[in-house]
Amino acid sequence: MGSVKAVAVIAGNANVRGSLHFIQDPAGSTHVKGRITGLTPGLHGFHIHALGDTTNGCMSTGPHFNPLKKDHGAPTDKERHAGDLGNIVAGPDGVAEVSIKDMQISLSGQHSILGRAVVVHADPDDLGRGGHELSKTTGNAGGRVGCGIIGLQSSA
């Protein structure tokens, strides 16, 4: 059937803007690719959240997408939320070029991320290793500075 594609338009605090493309490889991995501008330089936690609801901005997107009820972790960990995509890095110009391949997010099937939200956080994700009370749930990644709902993209 070829690859399934989705897109999320990112909007948020101040000048945070961007767009992300999700391309599902028939072999199972999903490639997240795009560009986000208006960030503070440095690392920003980057996750799929459970709900595609932005009625209250990025706050209403719910917790990390975690269908298997695991602790928060790094993308390479066995113990992680499906939505844990680690960190993206914004350069001195506030621009993050995103290119992440991940096996646990899918655009089809029981645990599809379609209709959910992608969220960019204010602070680095400690990947569950920070020893903070929030490390095992959110990676202590701070506020939600940008988000977008993941929707199917036209195949044209």
Image (cartoon, rainbow, N blue to C red):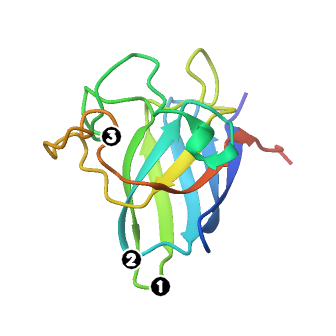
Q: CA distance from mark 3 to mark 1?
A: 26 Å
Task: Name the residue nearer the viewer: 123 or 73.
Answer: 123
Element at label 3: loop
Mark 1 lies on residue: 93
Q: Position of residue 26 (x, y in %)?
A: 58, 30
1 or 2: tag closer to the N-terminus: 2
The residue shown at (40%, 16%) is 68
Quadrant of residue 101 in the image? top left
Q: Which mark lies nearer to you, 2 or 3?
A: 2
| Neighbours of disc 3 within 10 Å: few (<14), some (14-19), many (20+) | many
Q: Label 1 sits on what residue type?
A: Asp
Q: Position of residue 70 (x, y in %)?
A: 32, 21
On screen, 94 above or below 132?
below
User: Does the rendering let one see residue 146?
Assistant: yes
Element at label 2: loop
Q: Which mark lies nearer to you, 3 or 1?
A: 1
Q: Label 2 sits on what residue type?
A: Pro
On screen, 27 above or below 42?
above
Mark 3 lies on residue: 75
Q: Position of residue 35 (x, y in %)?
A: 57, 66
Q: Are marks 2 and 3 in contact (CB under 8 Å)?
A: no
Q: Are marks 1 and 2 in contact (CB under 8 Å)?
A: yes
Residue 19 placement, left or right of 142: right
Residue 116 placement, left or right of 101: right
Q: Label 3 sits on what residue type?
A: Pro
Mark 2 lies on residue: 41
For the N terminus, which image quadrant? Answer: top right
The residue shown at (24%, 40%) is 135
Residue lying farthest to the right in this orientation: 156
